[in-house]
Image: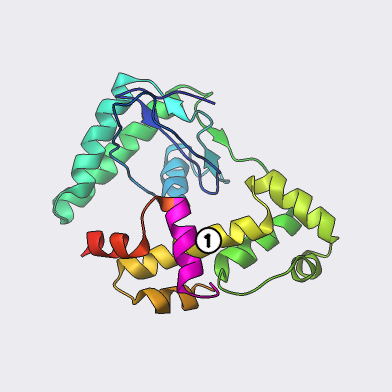
Amino acid sequence: MVEAEAGDIITVNPGEVHDGAPIGDGGRAWQMLYFEPHTVSAFFHDMTEERTGAFELPDPVIRDTRVADRYRSLFAAMTACSGPAQNIRAEEHLFFMLEQLLENKKTVREARSVPKAIADAIAKIDDEPDTPLSLDDLARLCGISRFQVLRGFARATGLTPHAYMIQRRLQMTKRMIARGDDLAEAAASSGFADQSHMTRLFVRTYGMSPGYYAAARR
């Protein structure tokens, strides 16, 4: 449990389970950027002479004015009109921000090792979130028992396989809605039983209805 104040940097690693609530009645707002894991890994590899492996940020809240200032510059570059000049500025700011994080050796660490069997199960859901899967299916894929799948999955992701699958389906739905797909089509293509099922989970997860999200993306 941590508390973040105005000006702090909040970090969430890929696949991490997280939640939040406002402190007091003043409300809150963020300037938020999402990076594909391979993008951040590629930058770290450049900076650490091609060291292999993924990286994690272990501190969910970073209170460092230098990092915050660099992030503001990165956010401005990435949300400005796209073009070669903006792209190179964004790359430069991201490199400098990650360099500031690397200065504190405790701030960046190599990601925890995940057993291959569990990594295979995670990859299966990542690649085909719309495919119905049972614990039996995952156990056969991994060559381990159903309980070992359940326990290993929870240790690696903080979620059960079913909860992880729902999370990935919602992310798939969100991408489809963002590109303008019909809500019913997005629900069916993402593996939900129907649109109302998708809507309930979407509201619970993102705090808004799919229709509201679609209108905001237009």
Q: Is residue 76 left or right of residue 133?
A: left
Foreground of the two, 110 or 46: 110
Foreground of the two, 39 or 172: 172
Magenta segment's dominant SS is helix
Q: Which residue is mark 1?
A: 168
Locate residue 2, reporting x and y percent: 50, 24
Q: Sort mark 1 into few (<14), some (14-19) or many (20+) by Cα contacts within 10 Å.
A: many
| Residue 168 part of the magenta-drawn span | no
Residue 26 in view in this figure: yes
In the rendered picture of this protein, how many numbered marks are placed on residues?
Answer: 1
Image position of 74 with respect to 86: above or below:
above
Q: In which quadrant is the C terminus drawn? A: bottom left
- At 69% across and 62% down in the image, what residue appears? 121
| Residue furthest right as drawn | 145
Locate residue 36, reporting x and y percent: 42, 53
The stretch of residues the image draws in magenta is 192-205
- At 53% across and 38% down in the image, what residue appears? 56
- At 53% across and 57% down in the image, what residue appears? 167
Residue 36 in view in this figure: no
Locate residue 192, reporting x and y percent: 53, 72
Q: In which quadrant is the N terminus drawn? A: top right
Image position of 177 with respect to 38: above or below:
below
Q: Is residue 3 left or right of residue 81?
A: right
